Amino acid sequence: MDPKKLLIMESAKKSFSLFGYKGTTMDQIAKIAGVGKATIYTFFANKEELLHEIIQSLITEMKTVAQKAIVEGATPFEKLHGALYGILVFRKEHELLIQLAHEVQQYGSQVTIEAMASIETEVVQFISEHMERAIHNGTMKSCDPKMTAFILFKLYVALVFDWEKQNEPLSDERILSLLQEYFGNFMNS
């Protein structure tokens, strides 16, 4: 990737993290990057396109985190848990994603709603593909992988983000145990 394009994307991430999508201007991004605004427009038509490309790069990073969390020799439960937990911890710790989620709740802007939805779609697709392989390998009972992946994702969001708003955060082990309790009948092992 062109070094200037990468610099612009990193600068935009910084600005979006600090000021949100709505509060960020192309002037701010140019100032942070130390380039003229015209330079940004050689790579990106507008702020929305810039955010879209950043989200795509974050999705790639999240998939890498999830793939690394899937340990060879682990049970299907442990693999799904490792991937989901890795993705959500990444999401929870990444300032830009936190800011975007906050902005979706506060303003409900279409651009930020679509950005967060594309992340969810990619995560559900990633998990669904792993479930399809488990079904094919006989380590998971036949089910609708996409629907099950969606439900699992929503359960994880609830356990990792929503639960701790009013309760003590759950440990990695407790979340795995809850996953086994609620979804144990899908696994053949």
Image (cartoon, grey):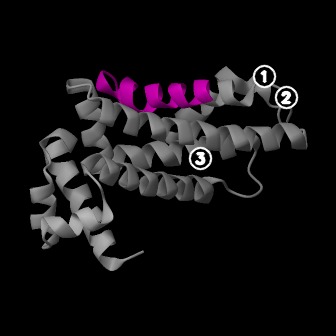
- Which mark is first along the chain, 2 or 3? 3
Pick out the residue farthest to the bottom. Answer: 3
User: Mark 1 — residue?
Assistant: 185
Verify whether residue 10 appears in magenta: no
Secondary structure at numbered mark 1: helix
Secondary structure at numbered mark 2: loop
Secondary structure at numbered mark 3: helix
User: Mark 3 — residue?
Assistant: 83
- Vertical order, 143 against 60 (above or below): above
| Discs 2/1, front | 2
Q: Which residues are magenta?
A: 150-171
**Residue 37 is drawn in which quadrant?**
bottom left
Verify CB contact (< 8 Å) between mark 3 and mark 2. Answer: no
| Discs 3/1, front | 3
Verify whether residue 162 appears in magenta: yes
- Vertical order, 51 against 109 (above or below): below
Q: Is residue 83 left or right of residue 134?
A: left
Residue 92 percent location from the top left of the image? 36, 43
For image coordinates 30% across by 25% down, the residue present is 165
User: Mark 2 — residue?
Assistant: 141
Give the Cα separation between the discs numbered 2 and 1: 8 Å
Verify CB contact (< 8 Å) between mark 2 and mark 1. Answer: yes
Give the Cα separation between the discs numbered 3 and 1: 20 Å
Disc ID at residue 5: none
Local crowd at mark 3 within 10 Å, few (<14), some, or many (≥20)? many
Q: Nearer the viewer, residue 84 or 38?
A: 38
The three-letter code of the residue at mark 2 reads: Lys
For image coordinates 78% across by 26% down, the residue present is 186
- The quadrant in which the N terminus is found is bottom left
